[in-house]
Image: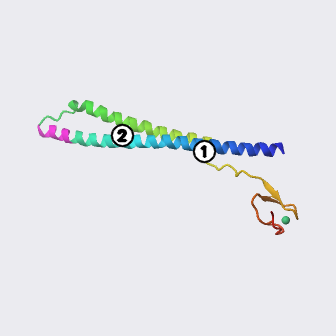
């Protein structure tokens, strides 16, 4: 009976770990997704602004890319930031899957009850024996 108790304890511990992994990473994931979306918005708006200035410079007759180097670098910074955040999200997903055993559900905790008439093992909560039909209390 010691083995049965141990495996019951294990399934409880695993359940607790699962809950804390999920709630902890969910919060971090939300933060990362918000950061990605903010960086993307910022990058799009600066790219748009840069395009307008680039065009105006060309229109004025001096389309040299060099004067925009700092802008390009800043935008590249956003790009790298977004990339890094997305990598972190992927990493978290992999860690989580490893921790949760590849997304498999832990077996349901609980034991068996035995039919008083025929002795068949039945899941806890069964109302009738599925072998002989005897009602279980
Ligand atoms: Zn029975």
Q: Main secondary structure of the magenta part?
A: helix
Taking the image as shown, residue 54 lies to the left or right of residue 133, namely: left
- Coloration mode: rainbow
Contact, mark 2 vs mark 1 (Cβ under 8 Å): no
Taking the image as shown, residue 33 lies to the left or right of residue 10, namely: left
What span is in magenta?
52-60
Taking the image as shown, residue 26 lies to the left or right of residue 46, namely: right
Tell me what residue is drawn at x 72 percent, y 50 percent. 109
Q: Secondary structure at mark 1?
A: helix
Q: Is residue 54 magenta?
A: yes
- Cα gap from disc 2 to disc 1, whole angstroms: 30 Å
Q: Which mark is residue 19?
A: 1
Q: Which quadrant contains ligand 1?
A: bottom right
Residue 34, quarter of the rendered image? top left
Pick the residue in front: 80 or 119. Answer: 119
Q: From the image, tell me which residue sits under label 2.
A: 39
Q: Secondary structure at mark 2?
A: helix
Q: x%, y% of residue 108?
A: 70, 52
Q: Is mark 1 within 8 Å of ligand 1?
A: no
Please tell me which of labels 2 and 1 falls first in the chain.
Answer: 1
Tell me what residue is drawn at x 81 percent, y 67 percent. 135
């Amino acid at each position: 009976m010691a083995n049965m108790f141990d495996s019951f304890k294990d399934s409880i511990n695993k359940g607790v770990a699962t809950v804390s992994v999920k709630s902890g990473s969910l919060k971090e994931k939300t933060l990362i997704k918000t950061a990605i979306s903010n960086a993307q918005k910022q990058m799009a708006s600066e790219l748009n602004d840069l395009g307008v200035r680039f065009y105006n410079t060309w229109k004025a007759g001096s389309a040299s890319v060099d004067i925009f180097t700092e802008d390009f670098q800043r935008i590249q910074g956003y790009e790298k930031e977004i990339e890094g955040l997305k990598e972190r999200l992927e990493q978290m997903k992999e860690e989580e899957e490893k921790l949760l055993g590849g997304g498999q559900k832990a077996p349901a905790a609980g034991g068996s009850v035995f039919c008083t008439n025929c002795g068949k093992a039945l899941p806890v909560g069964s109302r009738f024996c599925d072998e002989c039909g005897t009602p279980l209390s």
